[in-house]
Amino acid sequence: MKRFEERDVRRFYDLLQHTPELGFTQLNAVDGDQLIGVGLFDNEEDFVAECKRYNELGQIYAGVNPRSLNLLDAYGGLKNRIRSLFVDVFNDEDIACVTGIVVRDVGQLTDEAQAYMRDISVLDDGRLFFPMDKPLDFQDRSRRKLSRLLASWFFGEADFQNVNLMRMVTVPGTAKQGGFFLRPRVRFRKFRPFILDGISDAILEQA
């Protein structure tokens, strides 16, 4: 079976909803437990090309939320290309906005979150991908406050530690390190090409 499936990589990029105006998509290449490369992408074609180039060199992860355009000042060499880097130099202050949330356990979700279950995608490891219908920005609130709003809406408790805005996930369509013959690449367990209508306003209405 193929170790690279471009269709799934492109489907995943569409779900991210990252645009050049919002910020960069971070790609990490990891060999075992060691980070070996990082790139910041502002377009789909270069994103797909680098996923393919690094496909069997390491496990490929992408940031769920876009990284700030300001990173280009210090890390211009990472634009649209994975470069050798052995430490992830970014943190949650580099998140430009929230375009999606990935959570693991459906049993912990509130009724409001579970109402969207039919329309969400499920990633290879079983995590649930909730794409926002509008980006949630930090203009009128801190990252901690927005994380608490997200945690409250998804889990029913305002513990911001339950929400990881820096979440990196394996890219569907790329090779799975340690994968066997019948499961050679990362896949969607379920793919739904939907943006979740009304979810962004519902989260902010708690404020």
Image (cartoon, rainbow, N blue to C red):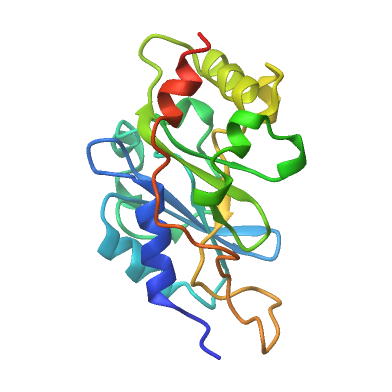
In the image, is 85 to the left or to the right of 153?
Answer: left
Instruction: Locate the N terminus and report the quarter of the image it occupies.
Output: bottom right
Number of numbered discs visible in the structure rendering: 0
Residue 182 coordinates in the image, percent (x, y): 67, 87
In the drawing, does residue 196 fall left or right of residue 168?
left
Classify residue 64 as left or right of residue 44. right
* Depth check, front residue: 168 or 87: 168
Identify the residue at image location x=38%, y=57%.
Answer: 13
Residue in the image at 67% along x and 89% along y: 181
Q: Does 176 sit left or right of 107 as displayed?
A: left
Q: Is residue 51 above or below residue 134?
A: below
Q: Residue 59 at what x, y percent from top left?
A: 59, 66
In the image, 145 versus 132, the foreground residue is 132
Where residue 65 sits in the image (x, y, percent)? 45, 39
Residue found 30% across the figure and 56% down from its top = 80
Q: Is residue 154 above or below residue 65?
A: above
Task: Indicate the quadrant where residue 199 lies.
Answer: top left
Asked if one can make out residue 87 in the rendered structure from this viewpoint, the answer is: no
Inspect this view and state whether residue 111 appears: yes
Residue 137 lies in quadrant: top left
